[in-house]
Every structure is written in C-alpha cells, then in structure tokens.
Image: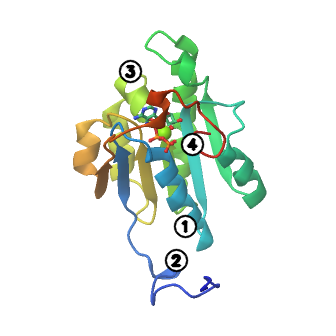
Amino acid sequence: MNTVSSGSGEAGCGATNRTRGLVMVNTGNGKGKTTAALGLLLRAWGHDMKVVMLQFIKSATANYGEHRAARRMGIEILAGGTGFTQRGKKAGKHEHLAQELWSVAKEKINSGAYQMVILDEISYPLRYDWLSVDEVLDVLRHRPETVHVVLTGRDIPQELIDFADVATDLREVKHHLKKGIKAQPGIEF
Ligand code: ATP
Ligand code: MG
C-alpha cells in the first residue's frame, strides 16, 4: 500500500508557491459543508500554513471531534455561539456573540498572519441580520491577498456567492437523521 510521506505532493504545490488567496463557499442543504471545510483546514495545516476556524452558532462549550483534534494538532477552532438548538432571530445573546466572533474574524483576516480563515455557519448571522453582508464583502475585498477565506452554512447570501472564487452547493439526496438515526460522534460532531 502506498502511503503519503512528507514532501511527496504534486510538483510545485508547496505553500511557498501559492500566490493568491481564494474565497470559497460551501452551501446548500446536504451534509458536508463543515466537514469539507475541515478537510481544507487539514490539508492546509499539512503544508504548515497557519489556519483557524471560527464557528458561529456552535456552542463555546461544545467539545466536538474537531475541537478535540484541534487541541491535539495545536491549532485554533473557536466556537462562539450558544448552540444550534438556541438559534433563531430572537436569540439576543447569539447576536452579541456573533458580532464578537466576527470582530475576531476580521482581525485574523486583516492581520495577514493566517493563510486560511474558515467562517463556519456564517450564513445564519448574515440571514438574521446580526452581521452585514456588505461589511463581510468589504473585509473579503480588502483582505491581504494571500489569505484563503472559506464560508460555510445553508443559504449563503447570493452576493457572497457572486464574489467567491469557488462555490459548492451541497444538495441533499438523503440523510440518515431523517430516518431516525441519531447524531453520533465522528459523524455529526
Ligand atoms: P457536517 O458538519 O456534517 O459537514 P453540514 O455542515 O453540511 O454538516 P449543517 O447545515 O451545518 O450541515 O448542519 C448541522 C448538523 O445537521 C450536522 O450535524 C449535520 O450532520 C446535520 N445535517 C446536515 N445536513 C442535514 C440534512 N440534510 N438533514 C438533516 N441533518 C443534516
Ligand atoms: Mg455545518
């Protein structure tokens, strides 16, 4: 069996050869938006790139598999919400937390210190008008050119899809939760 050893990637794919940061969108109703973003995080981290994932909505006390992995890898995944079950237009605390997390995200994007910043579930605060689409666009437009930014969540606003370099719409074909199989570690969290 072949294994991937260090430095064995495609010719010229080292982090130092990358010149242009991308804006990437994972949206749609199908499963895989966050996990695909985590795949990018892993891939970039493997190239010694500095990466961070900021999770809107998800609870700061959640201890999902990706949070456990991040601690062991020595990378940052910051969850700054009160959890999916509490979300909704009237969840005042959510709004405040989302704005706080967005401030952190802006700093990290603008710092130029990160090569990849993932804004997980950012579609919800945008759809609830807790964050302004125009402001997010402005930050993306003026970011340091080496920073990749990945946005995930159902129903990402069209303006962001228009601006993105790559956008993927994950379409639900079927989902096990709908036939009563409960959320489980390693799959949902
Ligand atoms: P994942 O985190 O598994 O990649 P996702 O980011 O695409 O999923 P979200 O919209 O963030 O999906 O959904 C959050 C939770 O709902 C996850 O636990 C996910 O497994 C589950 N989920 C995703 N898609 C569906 C669906 N079509 N029907 C029911 N549950 C779903
Ligand atoms: Mg998700």
What residue is disc 4 on?
Answer: 54
Q: Residue at x 52, y 63 (%)?
A: 115
Q: Secondary structure at mark 1?
A: helix
**Residue 81, horizontal then vertical, whole percent:** 59, 27
The amino acid pointed to by label 2 is Ala
As measured in the structure, the alpha-carbon distance from the residue carrying label 1 to the one carrying label 3 is 31 Å
Indicate the quadrant containing the C terminus: top left, top right, bottom left or bottom right: top right
Residue 88 spot, x, y in % from top left: 46, 15
Give the quarter of the image for residue 149: bottom left
Position of residue 139 measured from the top left corner of the image (x, y, whole percent)? 39, 46
Indicate which disc residue 128 carries. Answer: 3
Q: Is residue 38 visible?
A: yes
72 and 138: which is toward the camera: 72
- Judged from the image, the secondary structure of the residue bearing numbered disc 2 is helix
Q: Which residue is mark 1?
A: 44
Residue lying at the far front in this picture: please name it.
Answer: 179
Hey, which quadrant is residue 23 in on the image? Answer: bottom left
Q: Is residue 121 visible?
A: no
